[in-house]
Image (cartoon, rainbow, N blue to C red):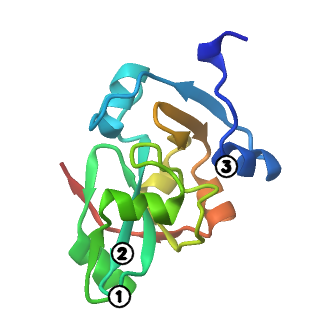
Amino acid sequence: MAKKDHVSETPATAMLKAAGVAFTEHPYEYLEHGGAQHSAEVLGFDPFTVVKTLVMEDEKARPLLVLMHGNRTVSTKNLARQLGVKSVAPCKPEVANRHSGYLVGGTSPFGTRKAMPVYIEETILALPRICINGGRRGYLVGIDPEVCVRLLGAKPVQCALAE
């Protein structure tokens, strides 16, 4: 196999394989601060189907993961209201790295260092297939979005804002 066709295993892909989840691999040239929009563009995907994994925390510094469309942002007010907490905010990169075990830009919801509650934008579950980070910068995996619910217990929320 050519180097571009296969990426070495990550905690995320190990978890998916152990659970018997079929996934496709999509490596790309990582761009610092390029985000999901960049990966969608270089891979030729609709940014709505590229899902970003955001490490956030509530007012008591309890970490949580939010899975959001690549071309949407999180309404932290709506999310906090739905979770029944005072506030939700993105973690600082070094804190996010510590919680997830991944570098920001390569955060996958699968195989995180710490078990954290996972929330998924409800409209993602209506998609037939999504691309989500595979545990490394410049590496997405294609999966059925229901895998997030089945493996992670992801709870649907409505907190998307158009960018």
Q: CA distance from mark 1 to mark 2?
A: 8 Å
The quadrant of the rendering that contains the N terminus is: top right
Percent x, y of residue 74: 27, 62
Q: Residues within 10 Å of mark 3 (few under 14, many from 20)?
A: some
Percent x, y of residue 23: 68, 37
> Residue under circle 1?
60
State left or right for residue 1 relative to residue 126.
right
Q: In which quarter of the view is residue 4 placed?
A: top right
Percent x, y of residue 97: 44, 57
Secondary structure beneath disc 1? Answer: loop
Looking at the picture, does residue 15 appear above or below residue 71? below
Q: CA distance from mark 3 to mark 2?
A: 22 Å
> Residue under circle 2?
57
State left or right for residue 41 relative to residue 119.
left
> Residue under circle 3?
11
Q: Are marks 1 and 2 in contact (CB under 8 Å)?
A: yes
Res 80 visible: yes
Q: Amino acid at mark 1?
A: Lys
Secondary structure beneath disc 2? Answer: strand
Percent x, y of residue 108: 53, 50
Say which label, 3 or 2, has the lower sequence index. Answer: 3
Q: Amino acid at mark 3?
A: Pro
Q: How many numbered callouts?
A: 3
